[in-house]
Image (cartoon, rainbow, N blue to C red):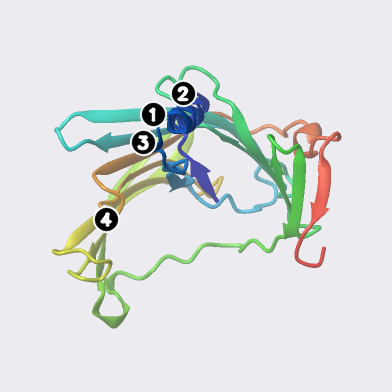
Amino acid sequence: MRLPLVSGLVFGVLCTAGIACCMAGAQDQSTMHALDGGTRERIQTLTIILPTTNAPFTATVTTELTKILSDGSSQTNWNHRTVARDSSGRIFEERRFFAPNGDKVATSIVQLDYSDPSRHEIYTCRTQEKTCYVSRYYAPESVRMEPAGPLPNGGGSVTREDLGKRMIDDLDVVGSREVTTLNAGVVGNQKTEPIVKEFWYSPRLQINIITKRFDPRFGAQKQNFVVSNINESEPDPKLFEPPADYRVVKMNGQ
C-alpha cells in the first residue's frame, strides 16, 4: 500500500486558494484560469506485514519523510499510526496524513485496512466516504528478495551488506544494507543513480523494525520507518473488525 503525503492543513489551504483564484477570475477576465489540481505525493509503506500465525503484536509505526530542497534546506513531515496482527494472521493498519508535528500529535486517519487470510479478504475503509471496499486477499507466506548482482536487461546492479545483529525493544534483529544502482537512462536519469536501503529485521515477528531509504527517483528524499511500542500479547479482537456504520462495497467479484 501507499500513503498520501498531504496533511489535512495543507489540503485545506490548497482548496481555499483554489476558490480564491476562481473568484478573482470572475472579477478580472485577464487572470481567469481553471482550478489547478495541485500535487499529491505518495510513499510506499514500511513493509509487507505477512499474515504470520502465532506471532501476534500491536505496535506504533513512526514515519519520517525528509526532502532536501533546491536551496539546500530541508522539509520534514511525520506521522505515527497503529498496526497489529493477531495469532490467526489477521492484520490491521491505520493510514494517516503527514504533518510537521505528526510524530508527536495524532494526525487524521485517512484509511483503515483489515486483512483476513482465512477469508481471503481485505477491507479498505476510507474515512471520508465512510465506505469499506472489499477485495480478494492472497498474501504471500514469505517475501523473496531480488538476488544480488546484475539487474535484468542491463538496468544496473544490486549489492548487499551484512550489518550484523542487535537488540531493539527486546527483539533480536538482523541488519542489512541494500544498494540498487540504476544505469543512466533506465528511468530517464542522466547518470547512474544509487537507491540505498537499510533494514533491521525481526525474524520472530517477520517485519522490519527499522527501515531507512534514500531514493533519488523521487528527488533528494529520505524515508525512515521505526516500529516501536511493540506489545506481543494477543490484540483486542475488536481491533480487527471494520467500522459497523460504514457502507460495504464488494469488488472484484466479491
Circle 4 or circle 3, nearest the eye? 3
Q: Which residue is more in the foreground, 102 or 164?
A: 102
Give the amino acid at mark 1: Asn
Name the residue at 58% across, 49% down.
49
Name the residue at 17% across, 38% down.
70
Give the amino acid at mark 4: Ile
Asked whether, in this view, residue 106 is left or right of residue 74, the answer is right
Give the amino acid at mark 2: Gly
Q: Position of residue 125 (x, y in %)?
A: 71, 42
Q: Is residue 30 above or below residue 117?
A: above
Q: Which residue is more in the foreground, 118 or 87?
A: 118
Helix, strand or loop status at disc 3: helix
The reply to whether callout 2 and callout 3 are in contact (CB within 8 Å) is no
| Spatial CA span between label 4 and label 2 | 26 Å
Circle 2 or circle 3, nearest the eye? 3
Identify the residue position indicated by label 4 in the image: 195
| Spatial CA span between label 1 and label 4 | 21 Å
Helix, strand or loop status at disc 4: strand
Crowding near pointer 3: few (<14 within 10 Å), some, many (20+)? Answer: few
Circle 1 or circle 4, nearest the eye? 1
Identify the residue position indicated by label 2 in the image: 102
Q: Is residue 169 visible?
A: no
The reply to whether callout 1 and callout 4 are in contact (CB within 8 Å) is no
Identify the residue position indicated by label 1 in the image: 77
Name the residue at 42% across, 44% down.
41
Q: Is residue 22 above or below residue 123?
A: above
Crowding near pointer 2: few (<14 within 10 Å), some, many (20+)? Answer: many
